[in-house]
Amino acid sequence: MTMESGEQILLRALATISQSDPITKLLDQVKLGRMKPTDAGLKAVTSSWLGTYRKILESAGLTKQALRRLDPTPRLALLIDCGVLAEDQPDVAALRTSFNRAVVTATE
């Protein structure tokens, strides 16, 4: 059994996050008016995605460079701007905290 390289860990993290990403799957539906930002299904997908994102960030093995590529800030901003997430939502704060903690403890 071999150890995963930093690039392999990053690629696996990106794939896992993108599988449940509400931006690629559902945000267009909100923009087109086919789905409301408050839709229960969208909220469930978004909540699951936030949890998955946090788990990835809290897992060991991500370098500072990898974390820069995984920074959730732009995605959170887009979801907040569209009304899918709220700036003061506990899940949003938890994801930001996890990211900041991961950056502080990561290796170069």
Image (cartoon, helix red, strand yellow):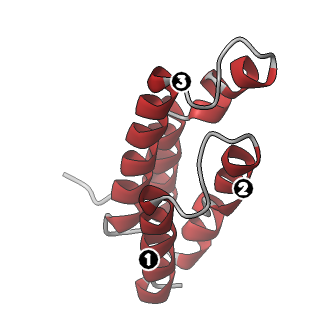
Identify which residue is drawn at 43% across, 57% down: 91
Disc 2 secondary structure class: helix
Identify which residue is drawn at 64% across, 69% down: 68
Above-or-below relation of 1 to 69 = above
Outermost residue on the left side: it is: 1
The nearer-to-camera label among 2 and 3 is: 3
Q: Which residue is mark 1?
A: 102
The nearer-to-camera label among 1 and 2 is: 2
Task: Pick the residue in front: 64 or 20.
Answer: 20
Q: Which residue is mark 2?
A: 77
Identify which residue is drawn at 71% across, 17% down: 29
Outermost residue on the bottom side: it is: 104
- In the picture, residue 83 is in which quadrant? top right
Q: Which residue is mark 3?
A: 39
- Please state which amino acid type lies under the numbered disc 1: Ala
Q: Which label's residue is closer to the chain start, 1 or 2? A: 2
**Residue 46 placed where, x, y %?**
49, 37
Distance between the Cα atoms at labels 2 and 3? 19 Å
- In this rendering, would 61 be left or right of 46? left
- In the picture, residue 40 is in which quadrant? top left
Distance between the Cα atoms at labels 1 and 2? 20 Å
Distance between the Cα atoms at labels 3 and 1? 31 Å
Task: Pick the residue in front: 49 or 88.
Answer: 88
Residue 27, disc: none
Q: Which label's residue is closer to the chain start, 2 or 3? A: 3
- Please state which amino acid type lies under the numbered disc 2: Ala
- Contact between labelled residues 2 and 1, with CB atoms less than 8 Å apart: no
Label 3 packing within 10 angstroms: few (<14), some (14-19), many (20+): few
**Residue 51 placed where, x, y %?**
37, 49
- In this rendering, would 35 be left or right of 57? right
- Please state which amino acid type lies under the numbered disc 3: Asp
Identify which residue is drawn at 54% across, 36% down: 18
